[in-house]
Image (cartoon, rainbow, N blue to C red):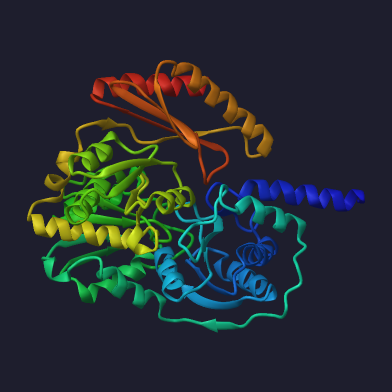
Amino acid sequence: MGTEKRMCRNEMQERLDKIFQGYDVRGIYPDEYDTDVAYRLGRAAVEFCGAERVIIGRDMRRGGPELFSALANGAIDQGADVTDAGMCSSDALYHAGADGGYDLSLMVTASHNPAEFNGTKIVQSDGTSVGKNSGLLEIKKMVLEGAFPEAGGRGTFRNDEGVMERFIDYALGFIDPDNLTPLKIVVDAGNGMGGVLTELLRAHVPFEIIPMNFEPDGTFPAHDPDPTRPECVEILRQRVREENADLGLGFDGDADRAALIDEKGGLINGSELGSVLARKILARQPGAKISYCLVSSWTIRDTIEDHGGQPVITPVGGANIRQVMKEEDIVLATERSGHYYLKENHLADSGLIAALMALEDLCQEGCMLSELIDPYRKYRMAPELSILLGTPESSVSELDEIKREKMQRANEFAQGAEVIVRNEPRFEFKDWWFCVRPSGTEPRRLRMTVEAKTQEQLDERYEQVKALLAE
């Protein structure tokens, strides 16, 4: 192999190491994730999954049309028939893929990441996501090599323009619309796909909807598209109070996550809303298995047990969670980050379906949202801390070494704890627990979560763990 060719391969390897992450492909467009990689990814995904029919959607991010075309051309060149789902939310695409009998669904999105990012989520026909532990590394190797088995011929291409409308009808099937009562709701779509979904929903619900940032815009002029970060919902919280609204609803970029704001402006976290959904589902499916991820509150575990369900702890990340759901027949999986997966929804997550189920419950209870959530606020959890590692020039191997060293510190600090391991460790003590894990979507970051039974314990332990990782 010549020096130039070897250098090109090394450069490609370094790029792929950055963008092939735990649950999907995601990187800065076009510096890290470009149309060349997307074309190869389209071919590799079709070949690895043995797909004959593929549906591809995209959100409003910069580079979406170009990456879509590259993925589609790659899939077609590998012999698959491709359907264009157009600009849509991720949950709408997942439903279209399952409902239409497609072998593979590809979604062009970087979810909650800042505007400079784009990526691709890969979902197979059985509802499982392709992640690091379920085929993504094999696909990465094929993309690196750039050599694919010859297909019997090129596939075909067609458009499907009704994906979002059909998804609204489908999502409403998870509730009884007659149970809904008039509510005043401020909705912040964050310039993502949630605005399109909400506009389509208007005609079917008795809600007064006050829109914020409904225009799809991949530059995200209002704020980053992550409704679980307090700074991203601060204006929504203020607007709820100013409008004397019943609640606020925020979506992330591809609208597969939803976050609720109560009438006082309080942000409802994933474990609290997950507890509402768990109680609701266990009322009609007694004894069912419901899961919570490694960084979820003890609240969700307690709720599942108190209502006769079977709690199961899972790793973080959609690809990991869907795999556990399938293996253990879990009917609802919850994540602190605001993802809610339903067995009845093809194992997929949907911000809209979760929100509709919670709103139905709120209407039936006839109380304020803060009152509905209050029973699930018995522990104290700090906002997840994101710890930046290295420098922008740090290689993947250098970052991995930093992560290993900090994780080792955490292990040594946690001597005597009960260690719960689902890919990453969670250290549980009698009155508190903590989890330190590498981010599955941002290579330069560690995530730190701490929860305790009292605020005093939380303050003390949070500072201890934070100082430990900052050394």
Whether residue 470 sits left or right of residue 165 in the image: it is right
Taking the view exactly as shown, the residue that stands out farthest to the right is 2
Q: Name the one closer to the observer, 158 or 233.
A: 158
Whether residue 242 sits left or right of residue 90 in the image: it is left
Q: Where is residue 255 in the image (x, y as percent from the top left)?
A: 38, 61
Residue 350, quarter of picture = bottom left
Q: Which residue: 48% across, 66% down?
A: 60
Q: Which residue: 62% across, 33% down?
A: 400
Whether residue 110 sits left or right of residue 270 in the image: it is right
Residue 190, quarter of picture = bottom left
Q: Position of residue 344 (x, y in %)?
A: 33, 62
Q: Is residue 465 visible?
A: yes
Q: Which residue: 50% across, 23% down?
A: 470
Q: Position of residue 293 (x, y in %)?
A: 38, 41
Q: Name the one closer to the observer, 176 or 200.
A: 176
Q: Can residue 245 be seen in this view?
A: no
Q: How many marks?
A: 0
Residue 428 drawn above or below residue 213? above
Q: Which residue: 58% across, 24% down?
A: 405
Q: Position of residue 244 (x, y in %)?
A: 13, 55
